[in-house]
Image (cartoon, rainbow, N blue to C red):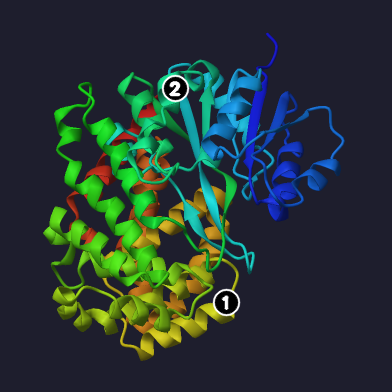
C-alpha cells in the first residue's frame, strides 16, 4: 500500500518576515510524500520574493486576486490540494521535523479518528525564548471546542473527506457584524464536525511552535469578540447539541468576553474593556468572587507570560482600567504581583534561563509570594508536559534547579513539588501498566510530602500495582 499523500496549506498576508522559516520547516519534514500549498491573500509585502527563494517541486504557489482573509485562503488551498490528509500551518508558525510522519502514522493506526492534533511550544518572537508548552487534552470533546478552542490551525490535522465538508467553512456569521471579520472559524469547523460524530484525539507529542509577537495590536476587538460569540451560539443552538453542552452556554460566552476584555485593556481601550468585562461578570458573577478570584488569576497569568512587558507596570495598567464597581479587587494587586513573579521565575528556570529565574524568584520572595497548592499543581502539569517532550532525565534536571529557588520563597515548597511530581508519575505508570515503577514513585512522593501517606488513591494504586507485579511474575 502506498503512503498517503499529505497537503500542507499556508495562508499568508503581511507575513513575509517569517514565511520563509515556515516553508522551510515543512520542506525539512522526515515524511516525504507531501505537497505544500502557499496561498498569497494579496499581501502588500515581499511575499513574492520569499517564494522565489525556494525551488522545490512539492511547493505550489497560489495568489488571490483580492484580499479575502485567512479562512478563504485556506479554502483556496484545500480546493487545489490532492492529499488524503490535510495539515494547516500559519505563516509565522513552525513544524518540527516529525510532524507529518507522526500524524500520518497515528491516523493510519486509528481509523476511527477524524481530526488529530498535538501539543506545541509557545515561542516569544522577539527573544526566541520558549515560554511554555500548550498541551490539549488527550481527547477533545464538543464542550472543549465550545468553551475555548483548545488547538490552533497549526496544531490541527484533518482527513480530506472531513475538510471538504462545506458546512464547516460557513462564514455566514461574518454578515451579522458591522464589519467583515473572520474570528471564530475554528469553533464552527470543530463544533460541526463534532456534532456530526467526528472524533478528535491528540498524538501525544509536541510537534510545532506557535509564535507570539510582542506588543501585538488587535484591530476591531469588538467585532472579533462578537463574531466568536456568534459562532459559539451557532453550535450551541444546533438541535444536535446535547443538553449538557448547552448548559455551558454562559461559561462559554464568559470565556470569550473575558479574553477580549483583557486585550482591550492592554491596548488602553478602557471603555470597550469595561463593557466586555461587565458582560463576562454578568454571565458568571463567580468570576470576581474569592481571594484570589478567577478574574485576577487570569490577568496575572496572561501578564506574566508576556515577556515583552514590564509586569508590574502592565498589571497596574490593567487594574487601573477595571470598572469602578470592581474597585475592591485592588486589594488583590499585591498578590497578583507576587504570583506573577513566581510564574515568571518558573518559566525562566524551566527554559534554560537560570539567572533570570533566580532573579524572578527573589522578587517573588520580596513581594511575599505564597507557594500554595494551586501553584504546585500548575507547575507539576508543566513538568509533566516537559517530561513528555524531553524525557524523565531532562525533567529531573529542571526540578533540581527549581527546588532551591522555591525553597527561598517558601519552606518545603521544593519538596512539595518533588512529591507532587512523583505521585503523578506513579499514577501515570499505573495507568500505562508499568507496575514495577509505582512503589518506587509512591515512596519518593511520601518521602517528599508525607500527606500522600494518607491519600486513598495513592494507597489504592500501590496495592493494585503490587498485585499486578505478582501476576506478571506468575505469568
Q: Label 1: which residue?
A: 354
The spot of residue 169 in percent (x, y) is 45, 27
Q: Which quarter shows the C terminus?
A: top left
Q: Measured along the vertical axis of the image, is residue 14 above or below residue 238? A: below
Q: Measured along the vertical axis of the image, is residue 8 above or below residue 135? A: above
Q: Measured along the vertical axis of the image, is residue 154 above or below residue 123? A: above
Give the number of the disc on residue 113. Answer: 2
Q: Is residue 204 visible?
A: no
Q: Is residue 199 visible?
A: yes
Instruction: Tell me which residue sits at (57%, 76%) in the image.
Output: 354
Q: Which quarter shows the N terminus?
A: top right
Name the residue furthest bottom: 366
User: Of discs 1 and 2, which sits in the foreground?
Assistant: 2
The spot of residue 393 in percent (x, y) is 56, 57
The spot of residue 140 in percent (x, y) is 36, 35
The local crowd at label 2, few if under 14, some if 14 to 19, many if 20 or more residues have their Cα within 10 Å, is: some
Q: Nearer the viewer, residue 111 or 267?
A: 267
Q: Nearer the viewer, residue 473 or 206?
A: 206
Q: Measured along the vertical axis of the image, is residue 211 above or below residue 109? A: below
The CA distance from mark 1 to mark 2 is 41 Å
Dot 1 lies on which element? helix
Instruction: Tell me which residue sits at (60%, 21%) in the image.
Output: 79
The spot of residue 454 in percent (x, y) is 17, 58
Image position of 252 (left or right of 91): left
Name the residue furthest top: 1
Dot 2 lies on which element? loop
Amino acid at each position: 500500500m502506498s503512503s498517503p499523500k499529505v497537503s500542507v496549506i499556508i495562508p499568508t498576508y503581511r507575513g513575509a518576515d517569517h514565511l520563509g522559516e515556515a516553508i522551510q520547516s515543512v520542506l525539512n519534514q522526515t515524511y516525504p510524500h507531501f505537497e505544500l500549498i502557499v496561498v498569497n491573500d494579496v499581501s502588500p509585502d515581499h511575499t513574492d520574493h520569499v517564494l522565489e527563494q525556494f525551488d522545490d517541486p512539492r511547493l505550489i504557489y497560489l495568489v488571490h486576486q483580492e484580499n479575502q482573509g485567512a479562512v478563504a485562503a485556506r479554502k483556496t488551498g484545500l480546493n487545489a490540494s490532492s492529499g488524503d490528509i490535510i495539515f494547516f500551518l500559519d505563516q509565522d508558525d513552525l513544524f518540527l521535523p516529525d510532524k507529518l510522519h507522526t500524524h500520518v502514522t497515528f491516523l493510519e493506526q486509528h481509523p476511527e479518528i477524524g481530526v488529530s492534533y498535538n501539543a506545541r511550544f509557545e515561542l516569544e518572537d522577539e527573544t526566541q525564548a520558549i515560554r511554555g508548552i500548550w498541551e490539549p487534552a488527550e481527547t477533545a470533546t464538543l464542550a472543549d471546542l465550545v468553551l475555548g478552542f483548545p488547538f490552533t490551525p497549526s496544531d490541527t490535522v484533518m482527513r480530506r473527506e472531513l475538510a471538504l465538508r462545506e458546512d464547516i467553512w460557513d462564514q455566514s456569521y461574518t454578515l451579522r457584524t458591522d464589519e467583515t471579520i473572520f474570528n471564530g472559524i475554528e469553533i464552527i469547523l470543530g463544533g460541526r464536525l463534532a456534532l456530526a460524530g467526528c472524533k478528535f484525539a491528540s498524538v501525544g507529542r509536541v510537534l510545532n511552535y506557535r509564535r507570539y509577537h510582542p506588543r501585538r495590536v488587535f484591530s476591531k476587538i469588538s467585532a472579533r469578540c462578537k463574531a466568536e460569540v456568534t459562532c459559539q451560539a451557532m453550535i450551541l443552538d444546533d438541535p444536535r447539541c446535547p443538553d449538557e453542552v448547552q448548559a455551558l452556554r454562559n461559561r462559554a460566552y464568559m470565556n470569550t468576553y473575558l479574553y477580549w476584555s483583557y486585550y482591550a485593556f492592554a491596548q488602553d481601550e478602557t471603555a470597550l474593556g469595561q463593557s466586555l468585562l461587565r458582560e463576562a461578570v454578568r454571565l458568571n458573577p463567580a468570576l470576581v468572587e474569592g481571594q484570589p478570584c478567577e478574574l485576577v488569576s487570569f490577568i496575572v497569568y496572561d501578564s506574566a507570560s508576556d515577556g515583552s512587558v514590564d509586569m508590574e507596570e502592565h498589571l497596574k495598567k490593567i487594574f487601573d482600567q477595571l470598572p469602578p464597581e470592581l474597585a475592591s479587587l485592588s486589594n488583590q494587586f499585591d498578590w497578583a504581583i507576587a504570583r506573577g513573579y513566581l510564574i515568571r521565575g518558573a518559566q525562566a528556570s524551566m527554559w534554560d534561563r537560570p539567572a533570570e529565574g533566580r532573579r524572578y524568584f527573589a522578587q517573588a520572595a520580596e513581594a511575599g509570594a505564597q507557594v500554595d497548592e494551586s501553584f504546585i499543581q500548575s507547575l507539576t502539569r508543566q513538568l509533566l508536559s516537559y517530561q513528555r517532550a524531553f524525557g524523565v532525565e531532562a525533567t529531573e534536571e529542571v526540578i533540581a534547579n527549581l527546588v532551591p529557588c522555591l525553597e527561598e520563597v517558601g519552606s518545603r515548597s521544593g519538596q512539595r513539588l518533588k512529591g507532587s511530581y512523583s505521585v503523578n508519575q506513579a499514577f501515570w505508570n499505573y495507568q500505562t501498566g508499568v507496575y514495577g515503577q509505582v512503589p518506587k514513585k509512591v515512596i519518593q512522593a511520601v518521602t517528599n510530602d508525607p500527606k500522600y501517606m494518607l491519600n486513598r488513591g495513592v494507597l489504592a494504586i500501590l496495592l493494585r500495582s503490587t498485585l499486578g507485579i505478582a501476576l506478571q511474575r506468575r505469568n
